[in-house]
């Protein structure tokens, strides 16, 4: 499992936002995502990952984050166990670190 810091993650989102082989997922609960999320990162709650495995076909890299970094590690382990072969990158510190850096968030 690779790791990336928030500053590098921001650069990757800006550079790869429209790249169909790169995916950005937030594994927080739907209510957490609704309250606050990073623009350009889609919601895919940890407990629903199994239902969405087909969405990762053809992906080369998947960036995963959550609130603090713990659930995203679990999500990556789960994706690997389910046979996803893309390179998976855990965003260190998650949304808490993003907030601390004052990069700005979106809400629904």
Image (cartoon, rainbow, N blue to C red):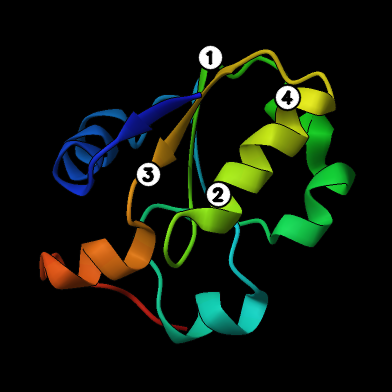
Vertical comparison of 61 with 18: above or below: above
Label 4 packing within 10 angstroms: few (<14), some (14-19), many (20+): some
Q: Position of residue 45 (x, y in %)?
A: 69, 61
Vertical comparison of 48 with 7: above or below: below
Separation of residues labelled 1 and 3 (CA atoms): 16 Å
- Foreground mark, 1 or 3, reads 3
- Foreground mark, 1 or 2, reads 2
Separation of residues labelled 3 and 4 (CA atoms): 16 Å
> Residue tagged by mark 4?
80
Separation of residues labelled 2 and 3 (CA atoms): 8 Å
Label 3 packing within 10 angstroms: few (<14), some (14-19), many (20+): many
Separation of residues labelled 4 and 2 (CA atoms): 12 Å
> Residue tagged by mark 1?
60
Q: Position of residue 42 (x, y in %)?
A: 53, 55
Earlier sequence position, callout 1 versus callout 3: 1
Question: Is the C-beta separation of discs 4 and 2 under 8 Å?
Answer: no
Question: What residue sits 69% from the left and 34% below the top?
Answer: 77
> Residue tagged by mark 3?
91
What kind of element bears circle 3? strand
Label 2 packing within 10 angstroms: few (<14), some (14-19), many (20+): many
**Residue 11 visible:** yes
Left-right relation of 53 to 88: right
Question: What residue sits 60% from the left and 16% below the top?
Answer: 86
Which residue occupies the foreground of this view, 71 or 19?
A: 71
Question: Is the C-beta separation of discs 2 and 3 under 8 Å?
Answer: yes
Q: Which disc, if any, is residue 72?
A: 2
Separation of residues labelled 1 and 4 (CA atoms): 13 Å
Question: What residue sits 45% from the left and 54% below the top?
Answer: 69
What kind of element bears circle 1? loop
**Residue 26 visible:** no
In this view, the residue farthest toward the front is 70
């Amino acid at each position: 499992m690779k790791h990336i810091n928030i500053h590098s993650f921001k650069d990757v989102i800006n550079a790869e936002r429209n790249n169909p082989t790169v995916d950005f997922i937030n594994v927080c609960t739907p209510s957490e995502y609704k309250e606050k999320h990073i623009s350009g990162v889609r919601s895919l709650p940890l407990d629903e990952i199994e239902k969405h495995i087909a969405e990762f076909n053809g992906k080369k890299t998947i960036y995963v984050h959550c609130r603090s970094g713990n659930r995203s590690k679990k999500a990556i382990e789960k994706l690997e166990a389910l046979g996803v072969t893309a390179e998976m990158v855990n965003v260190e510190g998650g949304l808490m670190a993003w907030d601390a850096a004052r990069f700005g968030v979106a809400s629904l």
